[in-house]
Amino acid sequence: MSPSVPEIHARPTARVPRRLRQEVERILFTEDQIAQRIRSMSRGIVRDFTGREMVVVSLLNGTVMFLADLIRNLSLPLRLDFIGVSSYGAGTESGDLVFTKELRLDVRGRDVLLVDDILDTGKTLYQVRDRLRVLKPRRIKTCVLLNKAARRVEAVEADYVGFEIPDFFVVGYGLDFAERYRNLPFVGVLHPHVYARAAQPIKPTRPGKTRAQG
Ligand code: PRP
């Protein structure tokens, strides 16, 4: 872990809203903490990309909030595009990657900032980076809000990391569990009973996207 990347801050005053207390155990990063961290990350990115042909490539869907806040802090000319990718699998483990939207912009010779919400096993970032390399960008830098190094399977690290986190099941600020909780303005820890229940189907169901990270 880079020494400049903050880990968990104990913030006992940040209370989970009453309506969510059955599902969200605690708040890991408040709206304010996230905003502050994004501002400081952005300064480093602006320094590194100034004078370059910058293309921000963001992975759908989890980056929705992080991306919106990040690019508003990037005070330099940039182009923006998206890649749709999802890991589908049974239980709470990541499965195979499915690409749902391809990149439209030409990145040849340009400097790419690849944005994701969380770096977990690394399977997503690893495969997407490989796919991008074929398009011959000048360089690819990676940026994630959360890094869960304990679960890494692929040898991939991000160049810019918002927060280092332990192996908690986190939701909110774009991150989901079974497509829920993306709209929470904070990052919180999901109560184990929520995903334990989902991992034990009572009746046959369509295989859902219930990866470990939500
Ligand atoms: C999540 C997350 C990352 C990826 C990280 O995406 O947004 O892209 O998993 O996991 P990994 O490092 O183990 O590959 P998901 O497939 O759940 O889609 P989503 O962004 O739509 O939530």
Image: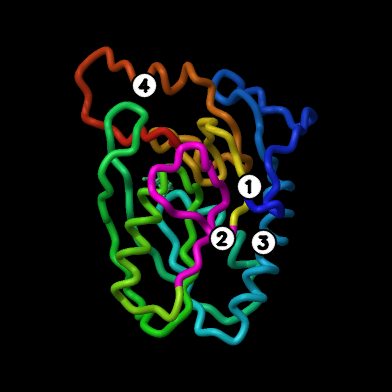
Residue identifier under label 3: 41
Q: Earlier in the sequence, mark 1 or mark 2?
A: 2
Q: Would you identify the image quadrant in which residue 77 lies?
A: bottom right
User: Rounded to the nearest whole Å, what is the CA distance between mark 4 and mark 1?
Assistant: 27 Å
Residue identifier under label 2: 68
| Crowd class of label 3 (few under 14; some 14 to 19; many from 20; radius 10 Å) | many
Label 2: element kind: helix
Label 1: element kind: strand
Please tell me whether residue 198 belongs to the stretch shown in magenta: no
Residue plotted at (51% across, 79% down):
54
Q: Give the residue type that dot 4 points to.
A: Ala
Give coordinates of residue 208: x percent, y percent: 28, 33
User: Rounded to the nearest whole Å, what is the CA distance between mark 4 and mark 2?
Assistant: 30 Å
Label 3 near ligand 1 (CB < 8 Å): no
The answer to which of 64 and 55 lies nearer the viewer is: 55
Q: Earlier in the sequence, mark 4 or mark 2?
A: 2
Give coordinates of residue 6: x percent, y percent: 70, 47
The boundaries of the magenta stretch are 140-160
Q: Is residue 35 visible?
A: no
Question: In this view, which residue lies farthest toward the top?
Answer: 202
Label for residue 163?
Answer: 1
Residue plotted at (34% across, 69% down):
132
Q: Earlier in the sequence, mark 3 or mark 4?
A: 3
Residue identifier under label 4: 198
Q: Give the residue type that dot 2 points to.
A: Ala
The reply to whether the C-beta atoms of the residues labelled 1 and 3 are less than 8 Å apart is no
